[in-house]
Amino acid sequence: MKRFQHTPCSGFTLVELSIVLVIIGLILGGVTLGRNLVRGAEIRSVISDAQRYQAAIVMFKDRYDAMPGDMPNATQYWGRADGGANLTQNCANPDTDVGTGTQTCNGNGDGLVASAPTWPLNNSEGFRFWQHLANAGFIEGKFTGVGHNAVAGNPTWNYVFFGENAPASKMQGGGYFVTYKTMAAGGIWTGSGIVVANALRFCGMTANTLPFDALLDPAEALSIDMKMDDGKPGSGNVWAFYSTPCTTTNVTTTANYASSDTRTCSLVFLLPPM
């Protein structure tokens, strides 16, 4: 009579399963840590970019006694984008004329960037801003000086297109553009201290290619604001472009950044006055 022989189970033991779970945890933790490190580097790059552009503006103004983009005699330095011979005059169509090199168009010299009331239809100064800075050697890159659709032959809407007519950021999908801005109009802010000034905006592109998309959550926006300014979204030199839901309220004197991990914030960095 044969005796029954027990065959050992071929599955994992509890110890082996524990080791596997620990390894999986370490891998997931490493991935999360890696993402956090990358995100932290992107946040720091926004600060360094804003500071670099602000310094470039100061140097430009010191050399040319004008705001980039608004400079009334830029064609005397870099030529006319429409090929005109008299460099003391402006281009025939500043919103659409594109040169082959450093050629550019003049601003109106009023100290305001992209001050036309019909933005983004006639905002050549906001695009010439980056072209003038690059022509002067104060920032890297080459920029068209006109709206994106103007390059394609359709000047109906002159969109910002990061990397073409305005600089892209190291944060994916983000970039910068400059405009003369009333904070009350853009962010629906109320209260005292409403600011009207030339401003550098950090943001992303919306689905219809407008530069209004929020790339930061409130904690990230707060971190940038505290490192560069007063940590308040409705005062100082760093503002939340849109107030709520990025902020707790739309009142300048009482607003704080909201408690949320949803990316609802884009920031405005006020530029030095002319």
Image (spheres, grey):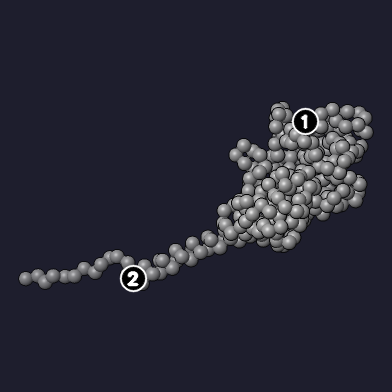
The numbered dot on residue 14 is 2
The tag earlier along the polypeptide, 2 or 1, is 2
Circle 2 sits in a helix, a strand or a loop, which is it? helix
* Label 1 sits on residue: 96
Q: Residues within 10 Å of mark 2 (few under 14, many from 20)?
A: few
Q: Position of residue 110 (x, y in %)?
A: 87, 41
Residue 217 vs 136, above or below: the answer is: below
Q: Nearer the viewer, residue 84 or 181?
A: 181
Q: Amino acid at mark 2?
A: Leu
Q: Position of residue 246 (x, y in %)?
A: 62, 53
Q: Position of residue 17 (x, y in %)?
A: 36, 67
Residue 125 vs 257, above or below: the answer is: above
* Residue 252 location, quadrant: bottom right
Is residue 262 something one can see in this rendering? yes
Q: Amino acid at mark 1?
A: Thr
User: Residue at coordinates 73% horizontally, 36% vertically from top-left?
Assistant: 120
Q: Position of residue 112 (x, y in %)?
A: 83, 43
User: Residue at coordinates 77% horizontally, 53% vertically from top-left?
Assistant: 193
Circle 1 sits in a helix, a strand or a loop, which is it? loop
Is residue 45 something one can see in this rendering? no
